[in-house]
């Protein structure tokens, strides 16, 4: 079976094509013929670091068709269109836990579904698990134009929060179309001054959670900061900090909700580019990851038509 990964660290050219053994589903798994995968920054960092020993096949996001089902599970059948939060999705086939797999509505493409997984699960956890955002609260989303941030904006809107989106000025129209109540460009204003003590919750999903001191300045006394940063800024008494990550313990609740809302047009998933499911396609996709881009990077076996 063909898969794509790396042994040595380096740039996109470090990616190689490998022949690996075809996987077999365990009792609590399904086997998926992969149609599309979404790429994440963690895979870029993993590629740069390289592999210890044999080839590393990265990837967490996959959409495709079920080709085999483990025993004792009647949830999925061969031929089902699904999306899943997996390991090693850069491959022709992948196994997925039943609890981390969701059926796809007919109107949702594999490309959009694959683009939704990691940012969608992360956004779900921010809004419902870590943030427990409620109607009437004010939420500032730093990195509102990104994959996670754009979905946090939309999910927070759905629960009735007032949402302030922070992004670069060039992304103002994109963020405003997501439904923010207010937009502030971080490259045209000092956001820690303009938005001082404004938010009940600051969600920082900017690259590496940059600007922790800004988060502290923008949150109200007694407020909450949720950030992709692993390091907490110095916090005044009463303000809490929570590191967020795309864990799989909420997949069974998050994925069905996300795909249903995306299929109904209630969630928009910005996609920057779709590349072919070939070695050249994966290399080009990682080059795009390394460059400035707006929206998700996807590799798919069938490219969308214009």
Image (spheres, rainbow, N blue to C red):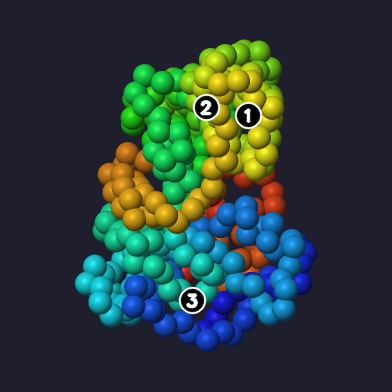
- Distance CA(mark 1)–CA(mark 2): 23 Å
Which numbered disc flags the more N-terminal residue, 2 or 3?
Answer: 3
Residue 53 rendering spot, x and y as whole percentages: 72, 78
Which of the two discs, 1 and 2, sits closer to the camera?
Answer: 2
Q: Mark 1 — residue?
A: 168
Which numbered disc flags the more N-terminal residue, 1 or 3?
Answer: 3
- Tag 3 secondary structure: loop
Q: Mark 3 — residue?
A: 92
Q: Is residue 153 above or below residue 284?
A: above
Q: Is residue 286 above or below residue 165?
A: below
Q: Residues within 10 Å of mark 1 (few under 14, many from 20)?
A: some
Q: Residues within 10 Å of mark 2 (few under 14, many from 20)?
A: many
Is there a contact, CB below 8 Å, between mark 1 and mark 3?
A: no
Residue 72 rendering spot, x and y as whole percentages: 25, 77
Q: Is residue 240 visible?
A: yes
Which of the two discs, 2 and 3, sits closer to the camera?
Answer: 2
Is there a contact, CB below 8 Å, between mark 1 and mark 2?
A: no
- Distance CA(mark 2)–CA(mark 3): 42 Å
Q: Residue at left 48%, top 46%? A: 122
Q: Mark 2 — residue?
A: 224
Residue 129 rendering spot, x and y as whole percentages: 42, 40
The image quarter in which residue 46 lies = bottom right
- Distance CA(mark 1)–CA(mark 3): 37 Å
Q: Residue at left 43%, top 74%? A: 95
Q: Is residue 36 visible?
A: no
- Tag 2 secondary structure: strand
């Amino acid at each position: 079976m063909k898969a794509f990964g790396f042994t040595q660290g380096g740039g996109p050219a470090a990616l190689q094509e490998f022949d690996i053994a075809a996987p077999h589903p365990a009792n609590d798994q399904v086997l998926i013929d992969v149609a599309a995968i979404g790429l994440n920054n963690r895979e870029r960092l993993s590629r740069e670091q390289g592999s210890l020993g044999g080839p590393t096949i990265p990837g967490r996001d996959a959409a495709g068709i079920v080709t085999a089902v483990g025993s004792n599970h009647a949830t999925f059948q061969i031929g089902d269109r699904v999306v899943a939060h997996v390991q090693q999705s850069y491959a022709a086939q992948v196994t997925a836990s039943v609890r981390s797999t969701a059926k796809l509505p007919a109107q949702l493409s594999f490309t959009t579904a694959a683009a939704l997984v990691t940012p969608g699960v992360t956004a779900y956890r921010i809004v419902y698990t870590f943030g427990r955002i409620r109607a009437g609260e004010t939420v500032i989303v730093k990195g509102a134009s990104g994959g996670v941030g754009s979905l946090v904006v939309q999910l927070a809107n759905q629960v009735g929060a007032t949402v302030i989106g922070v992004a670069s000025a060039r992304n103002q129209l994109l963020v405003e179309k997501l439904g923010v109540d207010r937009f502030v460009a971080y490259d045209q204003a000092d956001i820690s001054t303009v938005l001082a003590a404004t938010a009940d919750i600051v969600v920082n999903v900017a690259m590496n959670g940059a600007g922790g001191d800004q988060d502290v300045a923008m949150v109200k006394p007694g407020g909450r900061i949720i950030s992709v940063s692993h390091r907490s800024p110095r916090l005044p008494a009463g303000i809490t900090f929570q590191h967020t990550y795309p864990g799989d313990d909420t997949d069974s609740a998050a994925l069905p909700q996300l795909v249903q809302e995306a299929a109904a047009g209630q969630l928009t998933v910005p996609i920057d580019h779709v590349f072919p499911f070939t070695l050249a396609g994966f290399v080009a996709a990682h080059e795009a990851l390394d460059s400035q881009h707006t929206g998700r990077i996807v590799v798919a076996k069938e490219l969308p038509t214009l």
